[in-house]
Amino acid sequence: MKTSLTALALALTATAAFAEYPDKPVEVVVGYSAGGGTDVMARTVAQFLEQELGDGASVVVKNMPGAGGQIGFTEVSEAAPDGYTLGSFNLPAALALTKDRAADYDVDSFTYLANFVEDPNTITVAATSPFQTLDELIDAAEADPGAITLGLSSLGGNDHFAANMMQDASGAEFTLVPFKGASNARTAIMGGHVAAGTMTLGQTSNFPDELRVLAVLADERSPFRPDVPTAKELGYDVQMSSLRGIVAPAGLDDATTDRLRAALSAVNENPDFQEMMAEQGNPIAFMVGDEFAATSAKQDGIATQIWAETPWK
């Protein structure tokens, strides 16, 4: 009887603790400045997460920009695993940072809650480019190795990895030209300063008259550009994207983890959330829990391999 009463008391205590969460504001750390794509995603999720957590829950976004997002990712990894510090998580950027510099976190430093956005990379040329198809671009690169320049927003991120993977899949040799940010790379492509470039589909969407997207590096065609083929259907099995999701520090207890994953799943299923994300041009690719963790591990492996073969610093 005593054992049963003790077990019952523990169960009631656990239930009460579960019911009380959250009893103070939940903070979502964003490692980038306000107004960018990651910040917009995090604020949209936070708005709907408050509703799903209920009972007057407060979810606030805290911007901690710097070091390519590393400051924010570190802040989350070192926070107490109590459910009150969450963070935006960008792949492959967050883990690529751990290859070329000292970092206080790695792929195992987080509890993976849910990924919301997957913005696939593309192979893109200027609208005035003579290259009408991906095959034409590949043929030119094969005919004169290194003569075709490929612009990137930077080294050590999804653009760089997409370019490397495209070279490996096609056997073509490009000359990679990194810029300081996607806008600079896009300007160079539009101006014909580089022959082509790789950037996410979202970064091309406002320039339909200036850019020609030759291929999307995804498993399936994007609903935002259903007219553009995937590299895979053209014979080049390459998938690379910019992913944005929500994580917590490693060690978060099961009850809080389950509650947050359930709440974030409900956020994703909310039609108003879906509509808002579509208006923002944010392509949703929802993954929760183990699937998100497995994707992160896969991206970490890609970054590790590319760093070993062609280190970017």
Image (cartoon, grey):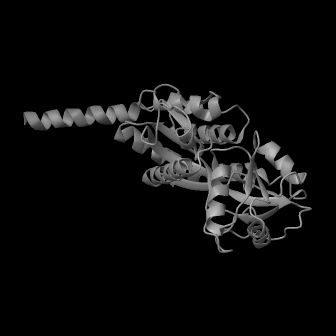
x then y, percent, for residue 211? 85, 58
Quarter occupied by the C terminus: top right
Q: In this orientation, which residue lies closer to the viewer: 106 or 114?
A: 106
Residue 137 appears anywhere in the view? yes
User: Taking 200 as reference, is 20 above or below it?
Assistant: above
x then y, percent, for residue 25? 52, 26
User: Taking 274 as reference, is 29 above or below it?
Assistant: above
Q: Residue at x 54, y 29 (%)?
A: 27
Count how many numbered circles sit on residues in the image: 0
Residue 59 appears anywhere in the view? no
Q: Which residue lies furthest to the top in this view?
A: 24
Q: Is residue 164 left or right of residue 128?
A: left
User: Taking 156 as reference, is 148 above or below it?
Assistant: below
Q: Residue furthest left?
A: 1
Quarter occupied by the N terminus: top left
Q: Residue at x 92, y 62 (%)?
A: 128
Q: In this orientation, which residue lies closer to the viewer: 155 or 208?
A: 155
Q: Quadrant of residue 197?
A: bottom right
x then y, percent, for residue 18? 37, 35
Q: In this view, does 311 lie to the left or right of 180?
A: left
Q: In which quarter of the image is residue 38?
A: top right
x then y, percent, for residue 42? 62, 39
